[in-house]
Image: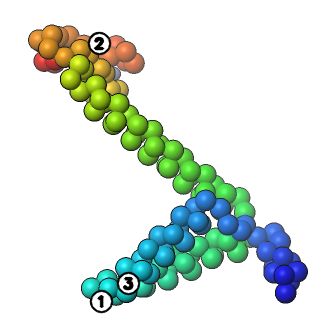
Amino acid sequence: MRQRFQRFMSGRYGADQLSRVLMFIALAFLILSFFPIFRFFYLIAIVIMVYTYFRMFSRNVQKRYAENQKFLNWKYKLVVKKDQRRKRWEQRKIYRFFNCPNCKQTVRVPRGKGKICITCPKCRTEFVRKS
Ligand SMILES: [Zn+2]
């Protein structure tokens, strides 16, 4: 039985970080569906599970790998953003943060200096803001 399963899985993609997260989400939906108002979540859980199994048994390993890579990138960016927000919050009394009107780069300036001319470090655009 185990051998047969191994033979079945050979050349197929298998589990990865994305499928683990998807399974977790499906499980969460399934648990929520026990509450009468969320009954339809049961369907969503099934759809997610079917998709996860489709990915695990897929023979298009490259495409599945790319999907997982995309997911990992997205997760990494989320962690970085969260860290940035935390740092900004800690510095809120000493600094002000502005976005460059030209390239959207975030610029940090000291607080309480009145109206100042800010030069974007990335594209050299100058803009005036009250600090
Ligand atoms: Zn700029």
Q: Amino acid at mark 2?
A: Thr
Which residue in the protein does label 2 denote? 119
Q: Is residue 74 visible?
A: yes
Q: Position of residue 102 (x, y in %)?
A: 30, 25
Where is residue 15 shown, x and y percent of the image?
Answer: 67, 66
Vertical position of residue 120 compared to residue 63: above or below: above
Mark 2 vs mark 3, foreground winner is 3
What is the crowding at mark 2: few (fewer than 14 residues within 10 Å), some, or many (at least 20)?
A: some
Vertical comparison of 8 with 55: above or below: below
Pick the quarter of the image with the C terminus: top left
Residue 59, percent from left and from top:
74, 70
Left or right: 4, with 24 as reference point: right
> Which residue lies under the disc numbered 3?
33
Q: Which residue is mark 1?
A: 36
| Residue at the spot 83% in from the left edge and 71% down from the top edge | 10
Please say if the residues under marks 1 and 2 sit with CB atoms less than 8 Å apart. no
Amino acid at the residue labelled 3:
Ser
The residue located at (37%, 79%) in the rendering is: 32
Q: Callout 2: helix, strand or loop?
A: strand
Q: Is residue 36 left or right of residue 128?
A: right
Determine whether the beta carbon of the residue marked 1 sits less than 8 angstroms from the nearest atom of ligand 1. Answer: no
Image point 65% across, 62% down: which residue? 16
Q: Residues within 10 Å of mark 1 (few under 14, many from 20)?
A: few
Mark 3–mark 1 Cα distance, whole angstroms, equals: 7 Å
Q: Quadrant of the N terminus?
A: bottom right
Separation of residues labelled 2 and 3 (CA atoms): 54 Å
Q: Secondary structure at mark 3?
A: loop
Question: Could you say where residue 61 lies in the image, as x and y percent from the top left?
Answer: 72, 63
Is mark 3 in CB contact (under 8 Å) with mark 1? no
Task: State the residue in front, 7 or 32.
Answer: 32
Q: Earlier in the sequence, mark 1 or mark 2?
A: 1
Mark 2 or mark 3, earlier in chain: 3
